[in-house]
Amino acid sequence: MAVLVANSLTKVYGGGGNGNEVRALNGVNLTIEAGEFVAIMGPSGSGKTTLLNILAGLDHASTGTLDLDGQAVHTLSGDDMALFRRRKLGFVFQDFNLLDTLTLAENVALPLALDGADRKTVRVQVETVMHQLGLGESMHRYPYEVSGGQQQRAAVARAIVHKPALVLADEPTGNLDSASARALLELFTKLHQERHATLLMVTHDPLAASYSNRIVFIKDGQVYSRLEREGRREAFFQEILQTLSVLEGHGHDLGPAHS
């Protein structure tokens, strides 16, 4: 079952007859099935951040349609969009975005509390997800009392505690050392395999992307090519490096992917 279906998304900035129109997205099609772990890659200025913002409901496409978990997202605005985003999406950011005045458990509980869940439900779901992610002993600590890796785990716990239809991760390893980054990526793999979470990660890091099952490469606002993981992660990593070499102009041109 498709969790997300984007058809012919375009995003145009500027215009108005002054010749300064910038086309950030140019007819992007994207489908994500339930339980997939998909990565989006592309050079700076390729449109991947614009695409993520539209998928997250933080921006609207100029044209095209977006359906997420059966809802026509492109028709929503204002309070309806905010409510949909809070209930159906989970977010993992590069900068964690934890509140220092709240404990890790209180941070994780925020999506449930904002949605008016009762105290028992909040406590049970928060304790369950934090124990699953190895944060049981850190529940009552504050963000500044734990490591960056634990902060990122708490951010992931907050993203999945309300069982969203889709988790969006924006450069999630960007502020982590190599050991913490690998731990986070292995955590994503665990969520994908054991909780059947649907994950979409924007990253510039080939190693991070190699943990996904499918990669969509964006260039000049279009889907340029795709890679499916068929075997070991190490082999997939080498395929990613080869594709990036072509994407950046160091190999034979693949041409844009229109499928």
Image (tube, rainbow, N blue to C red):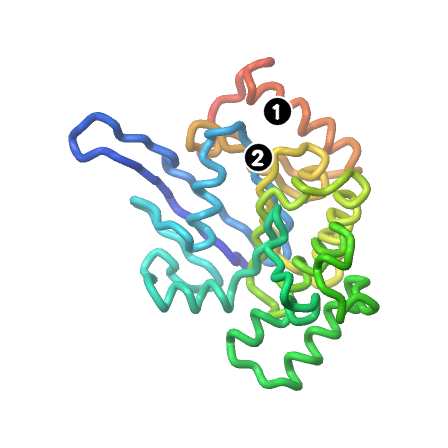
Q: Position of residue 91 (x, y in %)?
A: 57, 56
Ranked by sequence position, the earlier of labels 2 and 1 is 2
Task: Using residue 7 as the reference point, say whether residue 251 is left or right of it.
Answer: right
Question: In the rendered image of this protein, does residue 166 appear above or below residue 80?
Answer: above
Q: Residue 230, located in which quarter of the rendered image? A: top right
User: How many residues crowd around disc 1 within 10 Å: few (fewer than 14), some, or many (20 or more)?
Assistant: some
Q: Position of residue 190 (x, y in %)?
A: 76, 56
Question: In the rendered image of this protein, does residue 156 appear above or below residue 10?
Answer: below
Q: Residue at x 52, y 74 (%)?
A: 114
Q: Residue at x 47, y 63 (%)?
A: 85
Question: In the rendered image of this protein, does residue 15 appear above or below residue 101?
Answer: above
Q: Position of residue 257 (x, y in %)?
A: 48, 31
Q: Residue 250, located in which quarter of the rendered image? A: top right
Q: Which mark is residue 42?
A: none
Label 2 element class: strand
Label 1 element class: helix
Q: Nearer the viewer, residue 84 or 112?
A: 112
Task: Using residue 84 as the reference point, say whether residue 75 is left or right of it.
Answer: left
Task: Using residue 175 as the reference point, say whether residue 168 is left or right of it.
Answer: left
* Residue placed under numbered mark 1 in the picture: 244
Alpha carbon distance from label 2 to label 1: 9 Å
Q: Residue at x 52, y 58 (%)?
A: 3
User: How many residues crowd around disc 2 within 10 Å: few (fewer than 14), some, or many (20 or more)?
Assistant: many
* Residue placed under numbered mark 2 in the picture: 41
Amino acid type, label 2: Met
Question: In the rendered image of this protein, does residue 190 appear above or below residue 132?
Answer: above
Which residue ends up furthest to the left in the rendered image?
17
* Image label count: 2
Amino acid type, label 1: Leu
Q: Residue at x 56, y 19 (%)?
A: 248
Q: Are the residues tagged 2 and 1 within 8 Å (C-beta)? A: yes
In what quadrant of the picture does the N terminus appear? bottom right
